[in-house]
Image: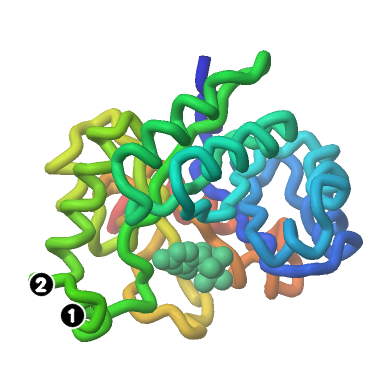
């Protein structure tokens, strides 16, 4: 059995290396977000013990380690992290179909509920020129669609994508493929370094399943209040 994603689509990105800061923030967000995203900086700095300190809040965790290696090594990495019982984890689709198949298979071997396994397609820091330098002909959008198709063919549960890619991938991959979407900015939030952004309600309307939101919550004076305001924005009827 694979984890069911929470009804609340907002996962807050805990982009910090400090356990105390992460735990305090997580405690304030209990009942206000659907999950927390723990990435490589936190996990490399604090390991499973740091992870467990955050997980003790009971909030589902998206362990975003973006695994990318040969199939056997990625499968081993996944076997090492599934005992932590993350709700969701990531692998790079560029690792190939055999790697993604091995990742999905390894994720189901443990005795507990299996994590949702999603693929990272083209990093949003790369543009068409960067891809050409790496020998990819065609546009970044073409490559995202190709890699999302590979992820689905390999049996992954979904992909991480920009809000502007949701329409295309939803149309290509159908209603059950999970789309995990960062680059979300609620009303009044600073854009920061994000370039291709969208509001939470619009991204959900286009077919996003999970909204990954970091600084608009973590940098707010009252993170819990910011998370509540996002819920209100999502619930409000479209103008
Ligand atoms: O603070 P902000 O809302 O921009 O945080 C978004 C989170 O999603 C960060 O953890 C960022 O690294 C991550 N992310 C992203 N764009 C991607 C993939 C991940 O912003 N394409």
Secondary structure at badge 2 equals loop
Residue at 47% across, 35% down:
103
Q: Position of residue 39 (x, y in %)?
A: 63, 59
Which of the numbered marks, if any, corresponds to residue 137?
Answer: 2
- Extreme residue in the left direction: 138
Residue 42 versus residue 146 in the image, above or below:
below
Whether label 2 touches label 1, CB < 8 Å: yes
Q: Position of residue 38 (x, y in %)?
A: 66, 54
Residue 128 found in image quarter: bottom left
Residue at 64% across, 62% down:
226
Q: Is residue 178 left or right of residue 22?
A: left
Q: Is residue 196 left or right of residue 174?
A: right
Nearer to me, 128 or 97? 97
Residue 204 in view here: no
Secondary structure at badge 1 equals helix
Which quadrant, please, contains the C terminus? bottom left
Question: Which sits earlier in the primary sequence, circle 2 or circle 1?
Answer: 1
Residue 60 versus residue 45 in the image, above or below:
above
Residue 97 found in image quarter: top left
Q: Which residue is tagged 1?
A: 132
Estimate how packed mark 1 is, as few (under 14), some (14 to 19) or many (20 or more) residues with alpha carbons within 10 Å: few
What is the distance, in whole Å, between disc 2 and disc 1 at their CAs?
A: 6 Å
Residue 224 versus residue 155 in the image, above or below:
below
Nearer to me, 212 or 227? 212
Residue at 25% across, 64% down:
164
Residue at 65% across, 42% down:
61
Q: Position of residue 207 (x, y in %)?
A: 28, 44
């Amino acid at each position: 059995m694979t984890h069911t994603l929470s009804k609340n689509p907002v996962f807050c990105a805990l982009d910090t290396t400090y356990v105390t800061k992460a735990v305090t923030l997580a405690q304030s967000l209990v009942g206000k977000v659907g999950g927390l995203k723990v990435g490589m900086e936190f996990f490399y700095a604090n390991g499973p013990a740091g992870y467990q300190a955050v997980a003790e809040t009971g909030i589902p965790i998206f362990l975003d380690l973006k695994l990318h290696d040969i199939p056997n090594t990625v499968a081993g990495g996944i076997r090492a992290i599934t005992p932590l019982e993350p709700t969701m984890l990531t692998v790079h689709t560029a690792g190939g179909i055999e790697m993604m198949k091995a990742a999905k298979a390894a994720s189901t071997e443990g005795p507990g509920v299996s994590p949702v396994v999603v693929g990272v397609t083209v990093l949003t820091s790369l543009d068409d020129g960067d891809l050409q330098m790496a020998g990819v002909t065609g546009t970044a959008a073409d490559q995202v669609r190709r890699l999302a198709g590979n992820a689905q063919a390999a049996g992954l549960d979904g992909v991480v994508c920009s809000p502007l890619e949701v329409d295309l991938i939803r149309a290509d991959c159908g209603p059950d493929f999970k789309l995990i979407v960062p680059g979300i900015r609620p009303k009044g939030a600073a854009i920061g370094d994000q370039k291709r952004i969208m509001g939470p309600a619009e991204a959900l309307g286009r077919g996003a399943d999970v909204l990954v939101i970091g600084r608009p919550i973590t940098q707010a004076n009252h993170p819990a209040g910011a998370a509540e305001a996002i819920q209100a924005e999502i619930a409000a009827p479209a103008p």
